[in-house]
Image (cartoon, coloured by chain):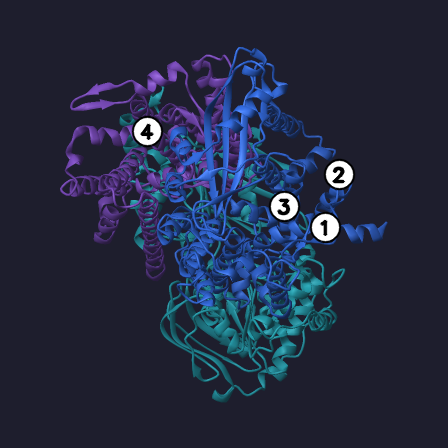
Chain colours: A cyan, B purple, C blue
Amino acid sequence: MKGDVILTMRNITKTFPGVVALSNVDFTLRSGEVHALMGENGAGKSTLIKVLTGVEPLDSGTITLEGKEILAKDPNHAVALGISTVYQEVNLCHNLTVAENIFIGRAPLKNGFVDWKQINKKAKEALLKLNIDIDVTKTLDSYSIAIQQMVAIARALDVSSKVLILDEPTSSLDQNEVAKLFEVIRKLRDEGMGIIFVTHFLDQVYEISDRITVLRNGQLVGEYEVESLPKVQLVAKMIGKELDELKSFNKEEISQRDFSEENVIVKAKNVETEKLQPYSLDINRGEVVGLAGLLGSGRSEIARSIFGIDRILSGELYINKKKANLKNPINAMMRGIGFLPEDRKTEGIIGDLSVRENIIIALQAKRGLFKYLRKKKQLQIADEYIKKLQIKCSSPDQPVKNLSGGNQQKCILARWLITNPDLLILDEPTRGIDIGTKTEIQKLVVQLAEQGVGVLFISSELDEMIRCCTRIAVMRDGAKIGELVGDGINEHTIMQTIAGGENS
Amino acid sequence: METGATIRGKEEINMENKRRFSLSSPTMPLVITFVLFLALYFGFSFRYTPMLKPQVFYNIFIDNATILILAVGITYVLLIGGIDISVGSVVALVCMATAYLLEFTTLHPVVVMILMLIMGAVFGLVQGTFITYFDMQPFIVTLAGQYFARGMTAVINEETIHISNKVYQSIARFQIKLPGGFISPIGLLSIIVLIISIFVLQYTKFGRNIYAIGGSETSALLMGLPVKRTKLAVYTLSGFLSALAGVTFSIYMLSGYTLHAMGMEMDAIASSVIGGTSLTGGVGYVLGSLFGTTIQGTIKTIISLDGTINSWYTRIIVAALLCVFIVMQSIFTKSKERVKRKEKSKAKTTN
Amino acid sequence: MSIIRKITSRRLFWPFVGFFAIIVFNIFFTPNFLEISLNNDGMLYGYLVDIFNRAAPLIILATGMTFVIATGGIDISVGSLCAISAAVACYMMGGDFNGVLRYPFWLALLSAILVCTALGLFNGFLVTKLDIPPVVATLILLTAGRGIAQLITSGQIITVYYKPYYYIGTNFPGIVFPTAFLVALVFVVIVFLFIKNTSLQLFIEASGVNRKASMFSGIKSSNITWLIYGFSGLCAGISGILLSSMIRAADANNAGLNYELDAILAVALGGNSLIGGKFSLMGSVLGALTIQALTTTMYAKDVSPAVLPVVKAIVVIIICTFQSETFRTILKKAFSRDTSLATKRMKRTRNLAFAGALVILIFFVVISVNPRLNPTFSVPERVMLDFEEAINVRDFDKLKSLYHENYVEEVNDYVDLIAVKDEKLMEMLSAISDTPAQLKITKTRLTITGDTARVHTNMKLITDDENLANKEYFYEFKFQKSKQAGTWKLVLL
C-alpha cells in the first residue's frame, strides 16, 4: 500500500580504521515517496548507502525490507533483494548499445544464444515505460549523460525494484534534463516505488522530495517532512553550530588592518573556468578570506583557478599586481601561492615517501632540479617544522602514510609554510581531524594573517570560519553570490545567504 | 502526473553529436581497414599483375593462416583490456614439441595434436591465474611466459627437427579445390576459427561479457558479471588458440626450430589493431583481424613479387601502420573526452 | 636482535644476498673461480672479470629501465634500440677490411647514441602527450626496431675492422681492465652522483607514487617522464655499442635479443617495485650483476644455455608474485587466524590451483631438462667426434650469402664449399667401428658471428652394427678468418 513503510534501517553503525563513519543511524523509507538523504562530506550518507547495498559490511544494526530482515552480501544480492542503485558515475559500459546495457548479464536467450531481436524489443519497451523513445541499437556513448542515466534507471527497474536509490543523479544535468528526470521520478513514485534521493542541491530537494533525512558527522540529525522544514533550518541542520569546545579569541586586531589596493595579493576579475561562473574576488595581505557554501558550490574550484590547476576561460587574474597566465601549479607557486588540497589522501600526501620528503617537496619543486636540498638540510627543516607544528611521528624518515590524518595534514601544512607564501589556500584543512589539532590549525591561520600572509580558507564548518575569517565569500552552484564582512559574519546570515534569502 | 509527450532521444543528438558519431562509431575502423585492404591489393595489382591471379590471392590465406588464428586469439585478449605477448613463442614451442614427439616417440599424430592443444590451454590458464587472481600486470606475466616458452623450445632441442610423419605431410600437401586454384586445410581452418569467433563474440553470453568487461571493468562488476572467471577463460582461450596456431604452423613448416615465429605476436597484435580493435579494450570486431592479416599478407606478397625490396620492410611498414592506428585511436578517445567535458560544463552554466 | 633487523631491512640487503649466494656457490663448486690472470692482450681474465665485463651493457640498460619503471611505465623497445645503435655505429664506421673509417670514430658512436635517445624521446612523447599506455607505445619500436636496423645495415652483418672498436669490446692497450667494465663503472658513477646531488630521485619517486599530489606540489611530472624515456633510449644506445663491439659487428637480428626482460629482471631483482615509486639504482646494478653471475655459472657448469630464459622467466614471476599486494594479502590471510569459512574455502581452491599449475610447470621443466627420465622418449645417444685437421672454405662470401637466408638446409650446398679430407673421415670411421661403415650427414647448422663461423653437423652411421647404428654422431668446429683474406683457419673448440 502506498504510504506503508517499505524499508527500515535501525542503529546502523560502521567504522573504518581510525574513523567512525556511522553511529547508530536510523533511516525509514515508505513506498510511494521520494526521500532525500543529505549531509556534507564525511556526514556518512555514502557509507549508509554502501551498507544498504552490500558494498560494505556493517558493524551492527538491522535492516528490514517489507517487514523481513535482510542483509545484502554484495551489490548483486542487493539487486536480487529488490534494492537497485543508479550511481552518479553512470556505471554502464559505454561501448555497448543501449539495449545491451539494460540486459547484459540477464539477456534473453534463444537456443542458448543471445537473442538480439528480443533484447532490442524489450529495451525499447523498458524505456518507453519511462517515456523515453530512442534508438536502442546505438552505443551508449552516442547519448548525453541525461539519457544514459535514464538507461541506468531502466536497467535498475527491469529487475523489479522495490527501492530505487539515486546517488547524486543531477550533478551532470542541465535544467531541462533535470526536469525530465524529475518527471520520471514522479511517475515511479506514483506507481508506489520508494526512492532514496541523495543530493546536495537544496532547490532540487524542495522540488521533488517528500521527506528529508539529514546526517552529520556520522550521526542522524533528524528526519523531516519537506513541507514543514524551511530552507534555512535545513542548512542549519547540515552545517550549523557544533559543540563549542574551542576558545574564541580577539578579532579586533584583524578588522583594524588596512586593506587598501596596495595590499592586494590576488585580484580575480570576472574569472570564468569550466566549472565556475565568472567571479570577482580580492584577497589582501594579512587577511583571512573564507569561502562558504555547500558541497559542490564551487569553493574548491575557486582555489584551483587561482592555483593554476584549472584553466581560466575568460577574465583576468592578477597576482601581486601583475597579470597572471597560470598554466600549472608551479607557475602559481613561483608567484607566491601555496595550496593545501581538499582530499589529502589522493591529492596531498605522497604516501610511500617519508615525512621529511613530503615536507620539503614543494620547496624543492620551487628550487628546481639542481638546487638540491641535501639530506642534512632536509632533516634540519623537517625537524624544525615537526617541532613547530607538533607533528607526531616516530622519525622524519617514517613513510607519511603511516601517520594519523591530523599529523598528515600538519605535514602538508608544513610543506607550504616552508615556501613562505604570500597567499596560502586551505581547502578543508581540519576535515577528519581531532579537536585538539583543529584548534592548533585555526590558531596557526590567525597567526599567519598577523604575519602578513593572506589566507583563503575553505571549510564546511561555519564555526571555524567565523572564528578565523575577516571576510566571507558565499558560493552557490558554481557562482559567487555575495560577500559578508564585519557584523555580517555570523551563522544566521551566512546560512541565509547560502539558502537564498528565505526567512525562517 | 504524466506528461503526454514522450521524450525523444533524437533531440539530444544535435549536429555535433552526429558528426562525432559517424567518425568514432566502432564499425568505422572496420570499414576503413577493409577499404585499405582493397585499395592496397587492387592498387598494387596494376604494377604487379600476378596479383590478379586467384591463386595469389588464395596464397595470402594459406601463408598467413597461423597469423590469422593468432590474431583472432589476441583479439579476445585485447577486447577484455589485456595483452598477451607470449603467443608467438607458444607457436614455436608447439612446433618443436610436435616435431620432437613425432620423430622420437611412437605417439599418433592426432594424439600429439590434442596434447599440444591441452598444453596451450594450460599455459594460458597459468598466465591467466597470475593476471586475474594475483592482480599482476598482463604484459609482465606474458612477457615472462614468452621467455619461458622460447626457452623451453630450445631446451627440447636446439637443432631443427624435420617432421617426416606421413600424416602431417599429407595434410600439408592436401589441396582443397577452389575456382581458379586451391586453398590448404590450414587456410580453411583459420577461416573456420574466425567464423566461430565472430559468432561467439556476437551471440554468446561469454562474448558479450568480454565486451562489457573491456568497456568498463568496474561497471561490469557492479552489473553482476563474472569478471574474474571471464578473464581467466579468455587467457586460457588465448593459450589454446596459440597452440592451434602452432599446430597449423608445424604443418606449414614441417619442422621444429627455435627461431620459428619470431616476432609473430607483434604481427598478430598489429593485425588486430589495424583491424579496429582498441588497445584499451571493449571495442573491436574479430572480422577486422582478418583484414589486418590480409593487409600484412598483401604487403608481403607485393614485396616478394617485386623481388628487389627486402623482406624486413614488411615489419617496418606494419609497425608504421600500427603506430598510425594507435595514435589515431588515442586522438579519437581524447576528442571524445573533450566533447564530454564540454557537455558537462554546458550543464553547469545553465544551472 | 635489532641489529639483525636493521641489516635485513636495508634496501640493498636481499639484492646483495642474491649476488653473493651465487658467488659463494661458485667458489665451492667451480674450480679456479676466483682466479684472475692476464691474457695475451694484457687484459684481466677470469670468471669474476667475465661477470663484471659481460654485465656492463646490462647494467647500463638496467639504469635506464629503473627510471622508466619508477615513473610507473615500462620500455620494452630497449633490445631493438640496442640493435639500431649497433647498426648505426657499424654502418658509419664501415666494414672496410683495412680498418678505414667511413666517418670519424667519435661521430659514429655519437650518432648511434643520439639516434637512440631521439627514439626514446619518441616513446616518451607517445606516453606523456598522447596518453598511450607505455607497453603499447614501446611496442611499436619493438616491432619496427630490428627492421630499421636491417635497413641501416642493408641486411648484412657489418663487421668492423677498425682497431679502436676492438678495444672497446676488449681492452685498450696498456689498460688491464676491460673497457666495457670501465664504461659501465664510469656511467653508473656519473648517474649516481647526478641523482645524489639533484632532486631527480625525489621528483621521479613522487611522480611514481602519487602523480596528482606531485603535480599539486609543483612537479612537472609529464616533462620528467618524457625525459626519462629519452634517457632510456640513451642507455640503449650505449649498451648497443658495447654489445656490438664485443663481437665487432652489427648483427641486426641478434643484437640485444631478449635483452628487455633481462633489464626488467635486473630492476626487479634489485628490490624495486615494478609498479613504480621508490627505487634504488644500486639495487638494479646488483640485479644486473646477479643475472650475469647466474649466466656465467650456467656456462661454467655446462648447463645448456637454453635453460637460462626459462629460469629467468620463473624468477621474474616469483618476484612479481611476491610484490603483488593481492598475493601478500592472501598470504596474510593464510597465516592469520581467520575464522571466516568462505575465505578459507576460497583460499584452499586458490592454493590448489596455484599448486597444480606449479606442478605442471615443474613437470615440463623436468622432462625437458632430462628426457631420460621419461621412458616413452627414446633419445639416441649423442657422440662427439674429434676433428683436428684444417678445413678449407673456398668461397666465404657465398657461404655468407647463404647465411643471409638464415639457415643452410641443403647439406650439399655447404659440402661444396667446404672440402673435407676423405682420409681423415676414413681414419675416424675405422677408429669407431671395425666393420665397414658409411657416415651419412643428416643435418647441418652454420652460424656466423663476426669473423667466426661455427659448424655443427649431425651424422648417422650406416652399418650392420646395431649398437653403433643407433647412435647419433655430431661434430662441431669453429672457423676464424685469418689475416690473409679468404682463407679460414680451424680453431679448436
Q: Nearer the viewer, residue A500 or B279?
A: B279
Q: Secondary structure at mark 4?
A: helix
Task: Give the residue type at disc 4.
Answer: Ala
Residues at marks 1 and 2 on the same chain: yes
Residues at marks 4 and 1 on the same chain: no
Residue under label 3, please give it: C291
Task: Give the residue type at disc 3.
Answer: Ile
| Disc 3 packing (10 Å; few <14; some 14–19; many ≥20) | many
Residue under label 1, please give it: C16
Measured Cα–Cα span from mark 4 to mark 2:
50 Å
Position above or below: A99 against C12: above
Q: Give the foreground label among 4 and 3.
A: 3
Measured Cα–Cα span from mark 4 to mark 1:
49 Å
Marks 2/3 in contact by CB < 8 Å: the verdict is: no
* Residue C124 shows up from this direction: no
Measured Cα–Cα span from mark 2 to mark 3:
18 Å
Residues at marks 3 and 1 on the same chain: yes
The image quarter containing residue B287 is: top left
Measured Cα–Cα span from mark 1 to mark 2:
20 Å
> Which label sits on residue C29?
2
| Disc 4 packing (10 Å; few <14; some 14–19; many ≥20) | many
Task: Give the residue type at disc 2.
Answer: Phe
Q: Give whichever of discs 1 and 2 has the lower sequence position.
A: 1
| Disc 1 packing (10 Å; few <14; some 14–19; many ≥20) | some
Q: Chain of mark 1?
A: C
Q: Chain of mark 3?
A: C
Residue A33 x/y as whole percent = 44, 40
Residue under label 4, please give it: B65
